[in-house]
Amino acid sequence: MSRARRGSAAMRPPIRLFRNLSSKLAAIPMVLVGLGVFVGGTAWTIVHSFTDSRLLPRLRWVGLDQYERLWSTRRWLVSIENLAVYGVVSLVLTMCLGFFLAALLDRKIRYEDTFRTIFLYPFALSFIVTGLVWQWILNPDFGIQSIARGLGFSTFNFDPLYNPDLVIIGLLIAGLWQGTGLIMVIMLAGLRGIDEDIWKATRVDGIPVWKTYIIVIIPMMKPVFVTALVLVTSGIVKLYDLVVAMTSGGPGIASEVPAKYVYDTLFTRQNLGQGFAASTMMLVTVAIILIPWAYMQFREKRQ
Amino acid sequence: MTAAEMNMKLAVTPRGAKPRSPFAPRNIMLYGTLIVFSIYYLLPLYVMIVTSLKDMAEIRVGNVFSPPVDITFQPWVKAWAEACTGINCDGLSRGFWNSVRILIPSLIISVSVAALTGYVLACWRFKGSEVFFGILLLGAFIPYQVLLYPLVIILRELGLFGSLWGLVLVHTIFAMPINVLLFRNYFVAIPEELFKAARVDGAGFWGIFFRIVIPMSLPIFVVSGIIQVTGIWNDFLFGVVYTRPENYPMTVQLNNIVNSVQGVKEYNVNMAATLLTGLVPLTVYFFSGKLFIRGIAAGAVKG
């Protein structure tokens, strides 16, 4: 982030409340959104997660009751487990696939623009569209399963959306389809930022291309990887629309996720306190992921 | 340019290595892999198109990949004008127009607010402005679920809950972090001498913004606009929480049409509806090309 103008006296009139007034007026939306919505809203939700609010929010304290109830609800436990499995697999595959595709595109190929357009277009589509298309492709009667059976594999079984054990795979196929393009573009931007001389040097040393990627390029791209990591993880925590469109949490509760638990508890089961406790847990998850990252960024900046 | 130089430029080679023939095993592998991945990414688009052009009889005897024999546009007509959600049978057109009515004000307001805030943060810093900016950026990582209910209360207090304007406000709020960052980083790079000259000529806060900054910043407005159009159009969660059924945006209505449990499933109508919903962001994506990529790269790598 550039801080070119920081402290440049010419652009900053002496700081008094009435000088620079237009600028302060123009900053009002930012202050309202930052303090009023982001800080205020978060604090409000956390505070109300310690109450027994049901249909309407009220401040009758019940301590950690909501959290105890949350962690003994099977649906929440299934949600957390699903998110963990989906999260880890999707994270690893998105990063690997994203980097792999970016590396392929960076090999000075022909039609690079065409390939990049193809890999990225799903990212422009909503999760609802993504979920509905893949729901159709994975339809056991007309989709992949029926085609494989038609080819003679009459016992071939692949109906992830109707099988509680496989349903996460169905979500992963669709999620990866939608999201890898973004990571590919970010990785490609990172690869383009690497000095041509590095490649020349490794070529002179006779290091094979694949080895150059592993021992030289990837370590050099650490910041890009970290950014991609943060981006993918914060997206995974928000996983909601895809599940709603593809499975509605089914079969049974096999593909429930925390974001859906929060929505359902707040708006269809009207159990506000419980919903607030669940959303606070989501916030805690994000914080656990982000704090080390923020710390790293901060340390790098000071150096 | 000599023929040899031309060849050097056109040859498909790895970075800097000696030129090889286009049919070297390495190239076959490279392009083969790219083509295989392209099929995975293009398949859903193909499936959507062919399914939406078949009639139900043809769907029942074939599979998702079989090309249409008798091309019919009936499913498109039905999806647009007749498909039912609940008791309303006026098709997706209602959702489409709702989305348009949400998109236009949200786009204008969110981009204007973000541009103005970015301008303050880049050129007219005051004491504390960076702190507010930091808070705003943190907001980008708060899971939406945490803020869902506080925003319900805010909108209710403002008398906007359930209306299109309420949703416009929500989109503006959640668009702020990323877009403010985009504008701020762009404006910081404008040469300071321009501002000094304008100040000498008597231009103030608004004069500099409207006469110098905005005319110079068309590309970043386009980038921010693209992010906003796809983001707002693809939104599902806010639409479902903050609007009443008659104002549901297209994504919500699409999901209700396709995942309704009543009646016989009309897969061709469903796919036509899905494709119709994806058409707006896809059009933006294919026409904006590099700017779209620039938008996500700027948002991601700098963030």
Image (cartoon, coloured by chain):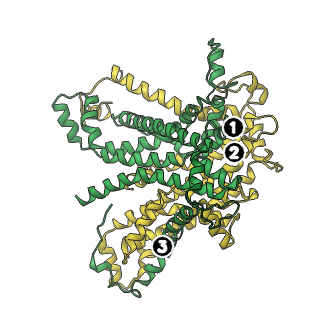
Chain colours: A green, B yellow
Task: Residue B297: tell me if it is visible.
Answer: no
The residue beneath circle 2 is B255
Please state the chain letter of the residue tagged with numbered disc 3 in the rendered image.
A
Which secondary structure lies at badge 3? helix
- The answer to whether mark 1 and mark 3 are in CB contact below 8 A is no
Residue B40 coordinates in the image, percent (x, y): 52, 30
The residue beneath circle 1 is B271
Residue at left offset 55%, top offset 56%: A64
Disc nearest the viewer among 1 and 2 = 2
Disc nearest the viewer among 3 and 2 = 3
Indicate which disc, 1 or 2, sits on the residue closer to the N terminus. 2
Distance between mark 1 and mark 2 Cα atoms = 11 Å
Distance between mark 1 and mark 3 Cα atoms = 44 Å
Residue A226 coordinates in the image, percent (x, y): 36, 47
Q: Which mark is residue A31?
A: 3
Residue at left offset 38%, top offset 67%: B187
Q: Nearer the viewer, residue B4 or A149?
A: A149
User: What is the tally of numbered marks visible in this picture?
Assistant: 3
- The three-letter amino acid code for the residue at tag 1 is Met
Left or right of A194 on screen, residue A86: right
10 Å crowding of disc 2: few (<14), some (14-19), many (20+): many
Same chain shared by disc 1 and disc 3: no
Q: Nearer the viewer, residue B220 or B177?
A: B177
Q: Report the quarter where the C terminus of chain A lies.
A: bottom left
Q: Residue furthest bottom?
A: A18
- Residue B262 vs A270, above or below: the answer is above
10 Å crowding of disc 3: few (<14), some (14-19), many (20+): many
